[in-house]
Image (spheres, grey):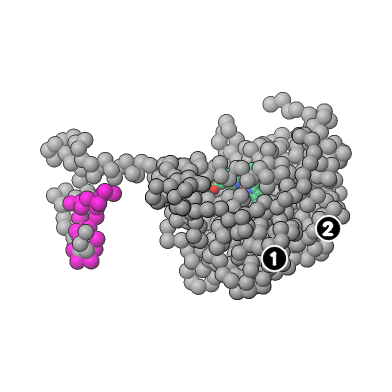
């Protein structure tokens, strides 16, 4: 189409038409047909019915009708930015991962920050975990480090994920609350799930109301593996440390900000990047071997535990800089598909049963959310390295094999081939055992690290935790749930438990939760676990 400057023309209904002239492109249909009038549908007579043959009208409305895709089942509200990762020194000793081979090497990155529980249109400053999902477009395929701003998780086994999420999101009959943990279902589930106690301490702390994305840490949470060229493995935990430090708001501020500016965190990231103040995080890793794992007090496969930094100091290995906002929110931030199973050669999984489950869930959910198996054809999800395979067809296929061959082996010498040397080789861990539905005894201690976290806080921070627990539990209408929570707190810190109990107006302190019962994950009848008749 020729380019035109626009000029104004008034239609016979008084409406203004902006008409192409000079450098303004001519408006076209999706099929490229030039449009003469975008203001009036085609009618039989000026006051008559619209005719079915008005293809421009039908196409415009049809497309609008289909603008929405399902929001993410969790982490629906998010905001992203582009940037790069830069490696400080070669980590070749530990990993063959392409991005860690040379000092100064840069890898393009896209990061999406999110809340977990709220819907897409919810407010930014909910008390919630924040997602910290990083896509690194390495020269050997995309690596997605899909983390949170809290280093532990609510549950130990992915099979419980639908339950915790159902419990935290809106209740099915009343369809509220949204983006609030202060409700009976959430605290009911938590009080019946002792393994969540460590995470609950973090979620009730100031970490759950960050001042902005720029002042948050990020954590890969699980234990992963680095694997080097000699196929030797080192366990690794990943941490993102913000250059600006860690800052939060207090609850009263959060409540006001949510009312005054629900887009507070979005605006902050947009404004800072647009003004050239690029936020930066350092990637730090905790590296350890099997012997350390065997001697550590907790199970390194248990996502409800950290490895304290005093015991195993993190090593800085690179930096992440966010320096460009997306051109289009939907195309990039909404359509980006993070998946824990996206790992390049040199990075591998551990047996963490939460991670193992996630590795199924993300691929599965993208199929539904992005409408088919070809979501890697969307530019934000496509690798930025050469890639070739025999996948073909399906809805919205943008790339099909070129030429005669769409299989291998073949005799035509066409198409890509496997590479035993360069390709991904799963770490050959020795596994054996009976097929059982059991949780290891080493996953059983649910209170020690919760206590460590609470004690590690400064006095004002401890006060905030007590206030948050009191406030949230005061919204819970079912007395036995409140008491059950206090019975867990008694296993964490007596003073904290007493403070919360007083704040809730409990006349007598309940007895501490039976740590042995919770350790065995045994929901055998116990007064604290009795069923509540509605
Ligand atoms: C989405 C983190 C556990 C299933 C996300 C996102 C993050 C995240 C950051 C948002 C990604 C984005 O910005 O697009 C985590 C962390 C977990 C965890 C750190 C535990 C350590 C799980 C588990 C499951 C799960 C156990 C299921 C078994 C999902 C699903 C989505 C999601 C289905 C939506 C993905 C999408 O539609 O794009 N998670 N998650 N997550 N997570 Fe998780």
User: Could you say which is closer to the camera, residue 534 or residue 520?
Assistant: 520
Judge whether residue 377 is colored magenta: no
What segment carries the magenta color?
A: 15-36
Residue indicated by mark 2: 292
219 sits to left or right of 141:
right
x, y percent for residue 362? 58, 45
Residue in view at x 30 percent, y 42 percent: 61
Residue 498 in view of the camera: no
Residue in view at x 75 percent, y 37 percent: 192
x, y percent for residue 389? 49, 50
User: What's the magenta bit mostly, secondary-structure-wise?
Assistant: loop
Q: Secondary structure at mark 2?
A: helix
Above or below residue 171? Residue 309 is below
Residue 331 in view of the camera: yes
Label 1 residue near ligand 1, CB within 8 Å: no
Residue indicated by mark 1: 284
Q: Earlier in the sequence, mark 2 or mark 1?
A: 1
User: Could you say which is closer to the camera, residue 85 or residue 268?
Assistant: 85
User: Could you say which is closer to the camera, residue 216 or residue 484?
Assistant: 216
Residue in view at x 32 percent, y 41 percent: 62
Q: Quarter of the image holding residue 104?
A: bottom right
Judge whether residue 22 is colored magenta: yes
x, y percent for residue 119? 53, 45
Q: Residue reaching furthest front?
A: 411
- At label 2, counting other C-alpha atoms closer than 10 Å, the crowd grade (few under 14, some 14-19, many 20 or more) is few
Residue in view at x 55 percent, y 36 percent: 175
Give the quadrant of the C terminus.
top right
């Amino acid at each position: 189409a020729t380019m035109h400057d626009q000029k104004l023309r008034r239609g016979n209904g008084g409406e203004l038409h902006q008409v192409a002239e000079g450098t303004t492109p001519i408006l076209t249909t999706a099929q490229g047909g030039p449009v003469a009038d975008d203001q009036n549908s085609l009618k039989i007579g000026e006051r008559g019915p619209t005719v079915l043959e008005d293809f421009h009208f039908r196409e415009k409305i049809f497309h609008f009708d289909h603008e929405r895709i399902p929001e993410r089942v969790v982490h629906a509200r998010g905001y992203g930015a582009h940037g790069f990762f830069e490696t400080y020194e070669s980590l070749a000793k530990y990993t063959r991962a392409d991005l860690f081979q040379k000092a100064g090497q840069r890898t393009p990155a896209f990061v999406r920050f999110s809340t977990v529980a709220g819907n897409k249109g919810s407010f930014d400053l909910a008390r919630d975990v924040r997602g910290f999902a990083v896509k690194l477009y390495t020269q050997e395929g995309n690596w997605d480090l899909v983390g949170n701003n809290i280093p532990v998780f609510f549950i130990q086994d992915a099979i419980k994920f639908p339950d915790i999420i159902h419990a935290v999101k809106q209740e099915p009959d009343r369809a509220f609350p949204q983006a609030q943990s202060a409700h009976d279902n959430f605290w009911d589930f938590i009080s019946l799930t002792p393994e969540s106690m460590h995470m609950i301490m973090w979620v009730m702390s100031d970490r759950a109301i960050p001042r902005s994305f720029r002042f948050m840490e990020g954590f890969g949470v699980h234990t992963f593996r680095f694997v080097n060229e000699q196929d030797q493995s080192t366990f690794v935990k990943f941490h993102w440390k913000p250059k600006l430090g860690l800052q939060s708001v207090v609850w009263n501020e959060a409540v006001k900000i949510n009312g005054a500016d629900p887009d507070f965190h979005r605006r902050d990231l947009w404004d800072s990047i647009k003004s050239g103040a690029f936020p930066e995080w350092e990637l730090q890793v905790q590296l350890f071997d099997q012997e350390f794992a065997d001697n550590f007090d907790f199970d390194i496969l248990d996502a409800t535990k950290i490895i304290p930094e005093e015991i195993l100091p993190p090593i800085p290995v690179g930096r992440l800089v966010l320096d460009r906002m997306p051109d289009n929110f939907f195309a990039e931030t909404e359509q980006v598909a993070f998946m824990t199973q996206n790992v390049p050669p040199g990075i591998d999984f551990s047996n963490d049963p939460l991670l193992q489950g996630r590795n199924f869930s993300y691929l599965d959910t993208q199929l539904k959310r992005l409408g088919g198996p070809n979501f890697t054809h969307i530019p934000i999800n496509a690798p930025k390295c050469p890639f070739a395979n025999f996948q073909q067809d399906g809805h919205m296929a943008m790339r099909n094999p070129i030429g005669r061959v769409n299989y291998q082996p073949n005799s035509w010498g066409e198409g890509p081939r496997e590479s035993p040397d360069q390709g991904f080789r799963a770490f050959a861990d020795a596994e054996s055992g009976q097929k059982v539905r059991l949780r290891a005894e080493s996953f059983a201690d649910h209170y020690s690290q919760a206590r460590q976290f609470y004690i590690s806080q400064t006095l004002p921070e401890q006060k905030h935790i007590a206030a948050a627990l009191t406030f949230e539990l005061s919204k819970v209408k079912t007395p036995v749930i409140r008491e059950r929570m206090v019975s867990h707190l008694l296993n964490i810190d007596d003073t904290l438990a007493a403070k919360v109990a007083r704040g809730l107006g409990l006349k007598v302190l309940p007895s501490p939760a039976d740590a042995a019962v919770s350790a065995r994950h045994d929901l055998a009848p116990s007064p604290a676990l009795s069923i509540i008749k509605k």
